[in-house]
Amino acid sequence: MTLNWSGKRRWIALVLVLASFVVMFNWPPVVPVIQLPGEIYPAGEVFGLPITNTFVGSIVVWIVILLLIRVVSGRRPRDGGEVPRGGFYNFFEMAFEGLYGFIGSIAPERYLGPIFKMFMTIFILVLLSNWLHLIPGIDSIGFLHPHVHKVEGHYELLDGFDLATLGGVHYLNGQCAWVSPEAAATMSDEALQARADAGCLSGIPAADAADAADEAAGDDHGEEIDYHHVEPGDPAVPWVILPYVRVPSTDLNMTLAFALIAVVMIQVMGFRALGIGYLTKFFNFSTLFKSPLGGIDVAVGLLELIGEMAKILSFAFRLLGSMFAGSILLFVISFLLPVIAPWPVFLLEFFVGLIQAIVFGLLTAIFMSLATVSHHHDEEHHEEAAAGAH
Amino acid sequence: MEALGINLGYLLIQIIAFIVIYVLLTRFVYDPLIAVLRDRRTRIQRGLEDAEKAANARMNAEAEAEKVLQQARNEAQGIVDEARGRGEEVAQQVQQDARSEAETIRNDARLAAQAERDAQLAGLRGQVAAISIAVAQQLIGASLDEARQQALINDFFAKVPDSARTLSGDVTVVSAMPLDDAEQQKVQEEIGADSVAFEVDPSILGGLIVRSADQVVDGSVRSGLGEMSQRLG
Amino acid sequence: MEEAVLVAGKAIGAGLAMIGALGGGIGIGLSVGGAVQGMARNPDHTGTIQTNMILGVAFAEAVAIYALVVSLIILFVLS
C-alpha cells in the first residue's frame, strides 16, 4: 500500500488540520485526571475484580494478537511454495526472519528456540500494548464520571469540569473548570461574567445555587447527595472523564507480570542448561575454604541473587515509567497546543514504544543466554550480566 | 501496593494470559514460520548446490565436448591424410598408367614408323636394284640377264652366312633392306632356328647379321668393307 | 494552606527526583557519540554497533526512567 499525497488527499489533510484548529478554539482540550492505577469501570466487579480500563486495553491487545495469529497462520505457505502471500504476511515474515536472525546472533544455538519464542512473545505483547496509545480515542473517550473522593464516610469534591451537550452527547467543557458555589461567591464580577458568557453551569453564586440545589436534591436539603448516581450534566458535581481503554503497559500489573515471567524464565533456562549446578551462581561455597578470597565469592553470589530480584523491578519500572510518562506527555502536549505540537510527539512515542518492546524482549533474551553459560568459566559474561542488572 | 494499583488478581490474569498467548503463538506462528524459514534456507542451500553441480556438469560436458571435438578433428585429419595418400597412390597409378600408355603408344608409333620405313625401304629396294644394275651395266659394259641380276641382288641382300646355320634358339636377323615373305621363309629355313625375328638396319649396307642369344654371325657388307679397309690400311 | 504546602513539597520533590535524569542523559550522549564515531570509522559494522548502542542507551535510559518513575509516584501516587 502506498500513500499518494498528490491530488485530493492533501486537501483532505489540510481541511482536517483547519478543522482541528476550529475544534481547538471552540472545545478546548481537557487535562485528564492522571493516576497510576487503572481507572475502575463504574459497572462494577467481575469475579471480585474491579474492571479497570488498562485491563480492557489488555483485552484489546489479546484480540489483536488472536487476529494476528489468524492472519499469519491462514496466509502461511503450507505447500512449501514461495508465492507471495499478501502484504501483511510478507511484512510479518520479514520482521520475523530478521528478529530470528538477530536473536540467533545472541543466543546459543542449542537454546535458540525457547529464547526466541520468549523474546518474540514479549516483543509482540509489549509492542502492541505500547502502540495502543497512538490510536485516537484511547485515553480520551470514556465514561463521564463525578470526580469525588470518599473520605471518612462523606464525599469530598475534587477538581473537574462542567459538562456540556452536543447532539445528545455529553462532553467535558474545557472552558469551564468546575467551581463550587462557595468558591464562586468569592470570585470577582468580571470572572463570573466571563464564566456566564462561556455558558458555564457550575459556580452559580450561593443565593441562586440554593434554589438549584433544592431542585436537584429534592426537599432534603441538608442531606448528602449520592455522588455515584447523579444525573449526567449535574452542575453540582465536578466531572472528569474515565477512558474506556488505557494503555495496558501504564499499569503496573502488566509490567510486573511480564517482569516476573521474564525473570522466572531466566532461572528456568539456567536450570535447563546447567542443571542443579546453576544454583552455584548464587550459593558459591566451593572456594570458601580453598582460596583467601572465597568469602568474596560467597558475597558475590548473594549479590547475584539480589540482582535477580532487582531485575524484576528493573524490568517492571522501565516499561511502566517510559510508557506512563509517554502518556502524560501526550496529554500535556495535547492540552497545551492541540494541533501541531503533538505530531512529533506521537512519532516519538511510536519509536519509544518500539524501542521499549525491543529492549524488554532483548534483555530477557540476553539474560536467558547468559544463564545458559556456566558461571565459573566465564568472567566476562559475568561482568556483562552485572552491568545489565542495573 | 494499593496506591500503585497492584492487584493480585490482575497479576495472575496477566501471567496466565501471557502463557496462553505464548502457547498459541508457538503453536500457530513460531513453529510453522521457523519451519518455513528452515525449509526455505535448505531449499536455497540445495539450489546453490544444484547450481554448483550444474556448473560442474557443464564444465565436464564442455571438457567432454572438447575431447569429442579433438577426437573428431583427429579422425578427420586421419581421413584427410588417408585420402591424400590414396589420392597420391591413385595419381601415381594414373601417372604410371599414362606412362605405360605413352610407352605403348610410343612403341606402337616406333613400330609403325619402322614398318613405314621398311615399306619405303622395300620400295627403294627395287629402285636401288635397278639403279645398281644400270650402274653395273655402265661399268662392266655387259648386261646381265634380268633374272640373274635380280638373284644376285637378292643374294646380296639375303645371303645367310654359312656359320649362321649352326645357330639355334631365338635368332634375330638384321638386314639392310626389308626382306619379303619368301625371303624371310628362305632365311628361316636356312638358319633352321626355332623362331626368327627380322630387323632392318640400312647402315649395314648389305648381307645379314644373325644374332642368337650367345653368338653373333656378322655377314654384313659393312663389316666386310671394314675388314677390307683394315687389310688395305 | 496545609494543602498548598503539600502540593509545593510534592512538586519540589518531583523536580529534585528528576535530577537523576541527568545521569541518563549524559550516558546516552556518551554512548551515542561513541557509537557514531565507531560507525564513522567502521561503517561495515554499523548494524552491530547500532544494536549494542540501543542496548546501552536503553540501560542508560532506564536510570532516567527510574528517576521519572519516582517523580511520577511522588506527584500522582502520594496523597
Image: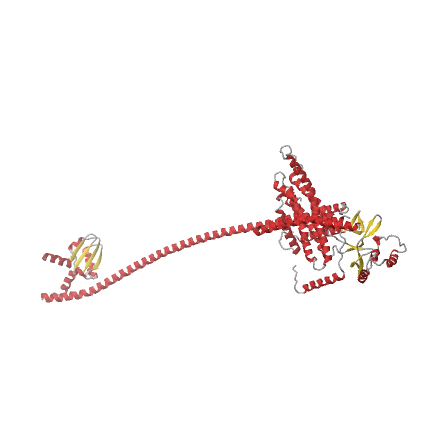
Viewer-proximal residue among B201 and C27: C27
Image coordinates of residue A205 in percent, x first then y, are: 85, 58
Using the rendered image of the protein, determine whether residue B123 is visible from the camera's viewpoint.
yes
Task: Name the outermost residue toward the right.
Answer: A219
Residue at figure coordinates x 20%, y 65% from the top left: B123
Viewer-proximal residue among A162 and A209: A209
Relative horizontal placement of residue A280, taking residue B7 as reference (left or right): left
**Number of disc labels:** 0
**Above or below, A212 relative to A290:** below
**Above or below, A211 relative to A151:** below
Using the rendered image of the protein, determine whether residue A65 is visible from the camera's viewpoint.
no
Viewer-proximal residue among A62 and B6: B6
Residue at figure coordinates x 42%, y 53% from the top left: B74
Image coordinates of residue B33 in percent, x first then y, are: 65, 50
Task: Name the outermost residue toward the top.
Answer: A289
Viewer-proximal residue among A54 and C76: C76
Colouring scheme applied when the structure was drawn: secondary structure
Image coordinates of residue A216 in percent, x first then y, are: 87, 57
Image coordinates of residue B3 in percent, x first then y, are: 77, 47
Q: To which quarter of the image does residue B8 belong? A: top right
